[in-house]
Each structure stands twice: as C-alpha cells, then as structure tokens.
Image (cartoon, rainbow, N blue to C red):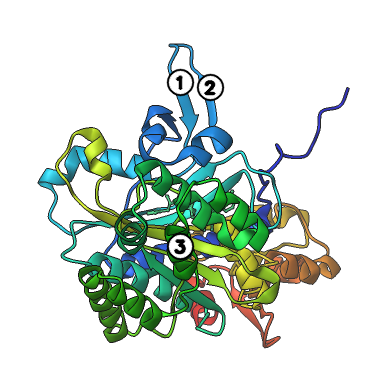
Amino acid sequence: MALNKQPYRGTRDFFPKDKRVRDYLFSVMTKTAESFGYESYDGPLLEEVELYKAKSGEELINEQIYSFVDRGERLVAIRPEMTPTLARMVAQVHREQSKPLRWFSIPNLMRYEKPQRGRVREHWQLNCDVFGAPGRMGEVEILQVAVELFENYGANNTHFEILLNDRAIVDAVFKSMMKTTDEQTYRLYKIVDKAKKVNEEGLKKMVGEVGLDSAAENIFYSYLQLKNFDDVKTFLTNNGQQEIADLFNNFVEQTKKTGLNEYLTYDPTIVRGLDYYTGIVFEIFDKHPDNRRALCGGGAYANLLQIFNEDQLSGVGFGLGDVTLKDFLEVHNLLPNLEIPVNDVLITFQEDDGLDASLKLARSLRKKDLKVVTSLDALKFKKVFPTAEKKGVRFVTLMGSDEMAKNQIQLKNLATKEQHSLDLNDLESILKIIKA
Ligand code: HAM
C-alpha cells in the first residue's frame, strides 16, 4: 500500500514559496523585537507535563496537549505554549540578570485542536516577554512592541484593534462585589472567556449552574455590559473599588501618552484562557469581517516563577501566531508577492565546454556577496530567459561560441534590457554593473 503524501493532520509542509512567506513573517518579527532590545532565546521541544499542569489551565491539559510516556517512564509533552518554558529558564538565571529582562522567541508549538481557518495543530508563535519592569511599564512596552510589529507589516488602526482588560478588575468584581468562592470565581472566568462565543441563552444556562444569588448575578451581567474605559471607571467607583479603578486609570493614561490609545478598547470578556495571568490581559483582533479572530494574546503574570520556588518576579508578554497573522495580512492585501525567489545573477553557457569558466565566474561573484545561480549544463538560448524569470534574478550572463573564442560573456540586465560584452576575467566591470 502506498503511503500518504499529505502531512499529519493540522500540520503544514512549507514548500519554498510558503517558506519564503514564513521567512518574511519571521524577519519582521525579529527586526521589531530587536529594535526594542529584546534578546533571542529558545528552549526544548519537549517538557514534562507537570510544567503545564501548574498554571496553564484545564483546557490545555485536558484537551489540547500532545503527551506520551518516554522510555524512562516520564510523562512528556510537546510544548503547547512557550511561557512555562520561558518561566523555567528565567527562574534559573534571573538573579544574575539586569532588569528589565527582555527576551523573544519564535517556537513551533503543538496543540490538539480541530483544524479550521486560523487554527491548526502545529503553529509558530512569536513570544515577547519582559520581566522585572517597574510598575506597569512592562505592560505598556509589550503593547508598543505588538503595535510596532503590525505597523512594520504595513497595518494601522483601520486593520486591527487591541481589546484589553485587567484581571485585578475581574477579581474585584467577582470576589469583592459578588462575594464568590474560589471555585465560583474559577468557573466564572471560564464562562467570561467563552461569553462571546455563546448566545444569551447559553450564557444564562452556564451562569445559572454556578449557583450565584440574584444580586451577584445582576452584578455579573452589568459587568458584561461595560463598553469602554469610562464605563469601567464609573462602575468600579460606584461599587467601592476606587483603588482598582485608579490603578487601571493610571495605566490607561500612560498608554495614551505612548500613542497606543488609538488601538485600545476596553472589553470585559477578555480574561484569557490560561490560568497564570494576574493583571493586564489583552487580545489583538483583526477588524476585517472575514477574519474576526484573535491574532495575538498576552498579559501580565506576577506569580509564575513561584512554581519553581523562586521569589516573585513579575512578567508580561504576548504570543502571536503565524497562521492568523498570515490570514490577516492576506485579507488586508499587506503580504508582499513572494511567489518567486530573489537572486542576483543566473550564469549560463550555451556550449558544453563553457562549464568550467561559468563555475569559476559564479564562485568569484559569490565571494562578493551575490546570490548566483548556475545552469550546471549548457542552456539553449531560448530557455535562458524563462529560466531567469523562475529564478528571480536581475541579471543573466550568456556565453556562446563567439564569446568563448574571445574569452568574454554577455551580461544582460533583465529590467532595462541593457546588454554588455565584458571580459570574463574583468570582475571589477562585471560587479560595477550588477551592483549599480
Ligand atoms: P494563546 O492565546 O494561547 O497565548 O496563543 C497566542 C496566539 O497564538 C493566538 O492569539 C493565536 O494567534 C496563536 N495560536 C494559538 N493556538 C493556535 C492554533 N491552534 N493554531 C494557530 N494559531 C494559534 C499563549 O500561548 C501565551 N503563552 C502567550 C503569552 C506569552 N502570554 C504571555 N507571554
């Protein structure tokens, strides 16, 4: 029986033209992260399942994790997210590092999900995280990095928005105002996380099952009605939560000074599905009606290092996936055309005995940092230009019997159609034309 040529469900083969797109996405990510002084790191593909059990949340552990027992009887997972690995690594070295510590990575992650538009089983995710920043300045900077990244792809506030919330607010509403137990609080978080995906009836059913009294239910539904930063301020102030209101307000004022406010909207349903978040949480959404989905998610996590018995060191960061990003750039026509590769020169010869001279020329040009493709075999004249087009070169060299007799090449600029007869050994003149 013949084997299946398709990749494993929910994973992708990256053929050269797909890989060019991925390389482009990654190059802008790297350039943006480095422009803020973030340092690149990486970790292992496998981690012990325990690492995720501590704080990642039940959905990830019960439904999405790829796990197996290794030959040494350890329960191992393929990383479904990077934050626990990052926290584990930071826990090893944070004492010797100056703060704030700024790191980024673009790992591939595996989650057992139902493949659909924007959701696959293996995706790559830019992670940018800061540890030990003063006050909420790490949050402000992380949002700036995310915005700058989208702007570097050519996007602006007509294309995307940042929906933001604060887990301190949600905690105040649930625990202080509604007087929920820990169990009820946890369940309400999960409900809020799903609130936009279910209809009113579904929501009421889920809330009914939590066992709240009617006063608490009313507070809960009023909370879900909050639409903007002023609403939430008034709601908190009127309900005796002045301190939380002021803290959040100060943060919002700071984002205004940094020019982020044109992107920010308050959204009570943003709480994030992962359990480690403790403060500001956000998701970046595509505004295009065909692609209304989260492009990026993140937030602040104050206590993650404590699972390694380390002192508190608060972190904040985001993860941004390659699949939704590519969909986003496509629907907004922001993806450059990467159908063909980009090279400088195609070196061809039309008679069999031109091989050695052409390989020698190619070698010399590569030493001058040019991308040089050789034909490796005599190439008929009529095939030269179609080949050049496929290889994405700007120049071709030709060497027929006339040129060979004179030790020359023809160098042709494909854009201007200019053609020069040049001595094969006159590297200086050849380079001058190519690099002009
Ligand atoms: P997350 O919200 O689970 O956060 O994932 C972040 C982003 O990764 C999503 O917004 C989406 O773009 C992409 N993503 C997640 N799962 C899939 C999937 N199955 N298929 C395609 N894309 C996907 C985290 O993972 C946090 N650890 C992020 C973080 C970093 N928080 C702080 N630092």
Q: The N terminus is located in which quarter? A: top right
Q: Position of residue 236 (x, y in %)?
A: 31, 72
Q: Nearer the viewer, residue 232 or 310?
A: 232
The residue pinned by badge 3 equals 220
**What kind of residue is marked 1?**
Leu
Q: Which mark is residue 185?
A: none
> What residue sits 46% from the left and 24% below the top?
76
**What kind of residue is marked 3?**
Phe
Separation of residues labelled 2 and 3 (CA atoms): 41 Å
Task: Choose top left, top right, bottom left or bottom right for residue 260.
Answer: bottom left
Is tag 2's residue or tag 1's residue first in the polypeptide sequence?
A: 2
Q: Position of residue 113 (x, y in %)?
A: 63, 43
The residue pinned by badge 2 equals 68
- Residue 170 visible in rendering: yes
Say left or right for 195 vs 131: right
> What residue sits 49% from the left and 62% below the top?
296
Cβ atoms under marks 2 and 3 closer than 8 Å: no
Tell me the mark number nearer the camera, choosing from 3 and 1. 3
Say left or right for 327 vs 212: right
